[in-house]
């Protein structure tokens, strides 16, 4: 008897390809994704942290230090687009817009250069704590190298002494003044992932209607497939907006997320993200034949997109290659948008790339869903 | 013509091997009926064809449905009934042929107003209440708000579910769900109602209730075409019967016409006698003594039952009983059975309805 139960279960499993994939392929796929993120991914990230160096001191020592920093492995010094010298304000703005992870500012010491070390400010984005720590270590090493007399350069300029205390001052230009800065990023990550799950589940109602002939019945009335899909899209979009709004309201009440302070950007991002997620849900629903198939496929796709797109693990810990791959996911664009609103506090017009991508993808998803739904119309 | 046989219901094979009318004749009659019905028909189907790839589901179906008429569509599984119904309600696009409503080829939108469709499945939202379901389907049928409210109230009364109006449909019995399923298909007051197995899986009381509801619609002038697996339903509850098999209409007419056209109107007489038929008696000799036509005899000597087929009960039954008595048998019971739709069906399709 027990053997029969086992045999039957195995046979049923073998007939269900989605379940087979979930059972065997998904863990391996996820292991690979996370191995890439936390294994070589982190190492890859440290090799190319985008920085900008600002030399305010303009002394021979600061120039030498600046050169040492620029050639340090693990850093990727960026320049101004017009190749003009970058000042502190411009550097800070580059950090704020996410063009660089850290700005290294070699400050002019207010005291005698012989008695104090060259102070270095690291203007960092605390959403990437790894980057500021790595840059701090590299700058410290460069400082040590810079103060040692070079045997091949006997006439090198006199080095300023290095104080016992660290002259490197890390300044969080992004998190300043935020009551609970990191939470807003996670709120967006989780919200987008569940937005996708709920949209897919809502889209599944279409398959349920098809399975019990309700869809046929609906289409035998005055309701057209266009109206049905659009109705469902509006409904799922509206539910998505309510869902994300509730999540952020909860975040504001309990965790200090500044929703009301960023309401305009939040509305823009939530509307386009919910619309695109709803279209994605409908696309998956029309692609599948049964609700079971949809459940399996949605779990695979949404978890993969969430892992690569930054809903589970912030994209800054990923290698540049993985970050590139992440841009092919829905989540990455949505999270980048929320990141600009809540973290970088950028004006709405800077959201245009994210809004454009999400709007376009939502439109494409809807069109493809409509094409797939043709098979449910009169045949 | 008298026929005497053993105590067996009309067997399929011998009858099928000697059809009274050929299928081509039936199809011709059906087509003629459809053509004759013409503009006065609520629904006229002419040479309807539908292929799914190489498979031909409908191979030139023709029939008509008169105004206020109730027609049962019968056929074994896979005969093309559901495809036909789906073509009529616009859910399947025919490969060929014509469908006319009230003498005219109408647009899809017009046909949606004229036709109501009740699918075989319970096509309702089980997580909505009765009233909510009715409201939803009324709005999908394009009924404007004020009339919608009226129609919903009428449907609740019609189904007898006023007291359960605000309960979730998912909690209802199969019969109650069937009634709501039916109501959702007639909210827009269609002239023609297509029902696919409206009583499948429901108890006799619920069946009765559903047919009472259909009677009311019929009385109001709605033409009804229903598919069913219950031959008794088809026989008792329809004005006419259309039998389809292998994508074609094989028979179309009233029950009497079908019987006449196929198995003939002769009655089956079963006579139970007190003692067993003597095994020593020669079969044809025994028959000669009982009946005038010994060629139709089939008997089992161990049986206590005699069976015969007679055309005229009033004249031939007394003669038959007298002969049995004369032969020395004491009659215990006599049963006269008219040919039923079941026999017609077996005759035409060669197999049972549920095969």
Image (cartoon, helix red, strand yellow):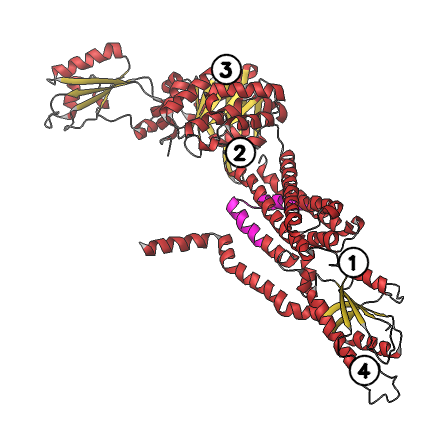
**Can residue B173 be seen in this snapshot?**
yes
Residue with the most extreme top position: B314
Q: Cβ–Cβ below 8 Å for labels 4 and 3?
A: no
The subunit letter for the residue under badge 1 reads A
SS majority, magenta: helix
Q: Which residue is mark 1?
A: A97
Residue A191 pos. (x, y %): 63, 50
Q: Image quadrant of residue A156?
A: bottom right
Label 2 vs 1, first from the N-terminus: 1
Q: Is residue B132 above or below residue A239?
A: above
Label 4 vs 1, first from the N-terminus: 1
Residue B172 pos. (x, y %): 44, 30
Instruction: Examine the structure image and report whether residue B252 is included in the region drawn in magenta.
Output: no
Element under label 1? helix
Q: Which residue is mark 4?
A: A147
Q: Cβ–Cβ below 8 Å for labels 3 and 2?
A: no
Instruction: Examine the structure image and report whether residue A291 is included in the region drawn in magenta.
Output: yes
Nearer to us: label 4 or label 3: 4
Measured in 3D between alpha carbons, the distance from the residue under mark 4 to the one under mark 1, in whole angstroms, is 33 Å
Nearer to us: label 2 or label 4: 4
Q: Is residue B78 above or below residue A327?
A: above
Assess disc 2: are there few (<14), some (14-19) or many (≥20) residues with their C-alpha within 10 Å of its C-alpha.
Answer: many
Q: Which residue is mark 2?
A: A214
Q: Which residue is mark 3?
A: B68
């Amino acid at each position: 008897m027990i053997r029969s139960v086992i045999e039957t279960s195995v046979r049923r499993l073998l007939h269900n390809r989605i379940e087979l994939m979930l059972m065997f392929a998904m863990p391996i796929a996820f292991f690979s994704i996370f191995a890439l993120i936390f294994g070589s991914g982190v190492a890859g990230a440290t090799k190319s942290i985008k920085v900008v160096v600002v030399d305010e001191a303009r002394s021979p020592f600061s120039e030498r230090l600046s050169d040492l920093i620029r050639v340090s492995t693990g850093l990727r010094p960026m320049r101004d687009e017009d190749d003009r010298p970058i000042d502190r304000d411009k550097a800070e703005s580059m950090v704020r817009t996410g063009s660089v992870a850290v700005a290294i500012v070699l400050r002019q010491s207010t005291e005698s250069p012989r008695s104090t070390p060259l102070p270095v400010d690291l203007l960092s984005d605390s959403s990437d704590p790894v980057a500021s720590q790595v840059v701090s270590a590299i700058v410290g090493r460069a400082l040590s190298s810079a103060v040692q007399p070079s045997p091949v350069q006997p006439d090198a300029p006199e080095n300023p002494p290095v104080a016992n205390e660290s002259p490197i001052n890390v300044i969080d230009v992004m998190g300043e003044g935020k009551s609970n800065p990191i939470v807003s990023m996670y709120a967006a990550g989780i919200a987008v992932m569940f937005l996708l799950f709920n949209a897919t589940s809502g889209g599944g109602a279409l398959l349920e209607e098809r399975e019990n002939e309700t869809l046929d019945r609906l289409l035998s009335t005055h309701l057209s497939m266009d109206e049905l899909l659009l109705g469902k899209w509006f409904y799922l979009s509206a539910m998505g907006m309510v869902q994300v709004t509730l999540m952020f309201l909860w975040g504001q009440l309990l965790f200090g997320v500044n929703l009301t302070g960023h309401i305009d950007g939040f509305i823009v991002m939530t509307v386009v993200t919910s619309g695109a997620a709803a279209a994605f849900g409908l696309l998956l629903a029309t692609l599948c034949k049964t609700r079971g198939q949809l459940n399996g496929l949605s779990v695979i796709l949404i978890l993969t997109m969430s892992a690569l797109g930054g809903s589970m693990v912030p994209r800054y810990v990923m290698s540049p290659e993985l970050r590139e791959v992440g841009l092919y996911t829905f989540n990455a664009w949505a999270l980048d948008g929320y990141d600009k609103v809540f973290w970088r506090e950028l004006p709405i017009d800077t959201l245009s790339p994210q809004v454009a991508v999400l709007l376009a993808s939502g439109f494409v998803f809807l069109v493809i869903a409509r094409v797939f739904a043709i098979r449910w119309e009169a045949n | 013509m008298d026929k005497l046989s053993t105590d067996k219901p009309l067997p399929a094979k011998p009858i099928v091997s000697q059809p009274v009318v050929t299928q081509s004749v039936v199809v011709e009659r059906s087509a003629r009926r459809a053509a004759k019905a013409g503009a006065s028909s609520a629904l006229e189907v002419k040479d309807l064809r539908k292929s799914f790839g190489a498979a031909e589901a409908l191979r030139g179906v023709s029939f008509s449905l008169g105004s206020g008429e109730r027609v049962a569509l019968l056929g074994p599984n896979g005969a093309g009934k559901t495809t036909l119904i789906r073509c009529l309600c616009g859910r399947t696009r025919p490969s060929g042929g014509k469908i006319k409503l009230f003498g005219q080829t109408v647009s899809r939108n017009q046909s949606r107003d004229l036709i109501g469709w009740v699918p075989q499945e319970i096509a309702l939202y089980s997580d909505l209440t009765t009233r909510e379901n009715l409201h939803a389907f009324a709005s999908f049928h394009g009924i404007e708000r004020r009339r919608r409210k009226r129609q919903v109230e009428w449907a609740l009364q019609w189904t007898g579910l006023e007291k359960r109006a605000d309960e979730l449909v998912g909690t209802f019995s199969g019969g109650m769900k069937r009634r709501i399923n039916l109501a959702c298909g007639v909210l827009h007051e269609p002239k023609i109602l297509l029902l696919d197995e409206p009583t499948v899986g429901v108890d006799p009381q619920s069946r009765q209730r559903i047919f009472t509801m259909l009677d009311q619609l019929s009385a109001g002038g709605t033409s009804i075409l229903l598919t069913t697996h219950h031959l008794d339903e088809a026989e008792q509850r329809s004005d006419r019967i259309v039998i389809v098999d292998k994508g074609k209409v094989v028979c179309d007419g009233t029950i009497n016409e079908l019987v006449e056209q196929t198995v003939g109107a002769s009655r089956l007489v079963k006579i139970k006698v007190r003692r067993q038929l003597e095994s020593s008696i020669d079969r044809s000799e025994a028959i000669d003594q009982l009946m005038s036509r010994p060629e139709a005899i089939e008997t089992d000597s161990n049986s206590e039952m005699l069976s015969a087929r007679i055309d005229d009960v009033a004249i031939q039954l007394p003669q038959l009983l007298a002969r049995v008595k004369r032969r020395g048998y004491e009659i215990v019971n006599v049963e006269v059975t008219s040919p039923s739709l079941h026999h017609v069906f077996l005759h035409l399709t060669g197999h049972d309805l549920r095969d």
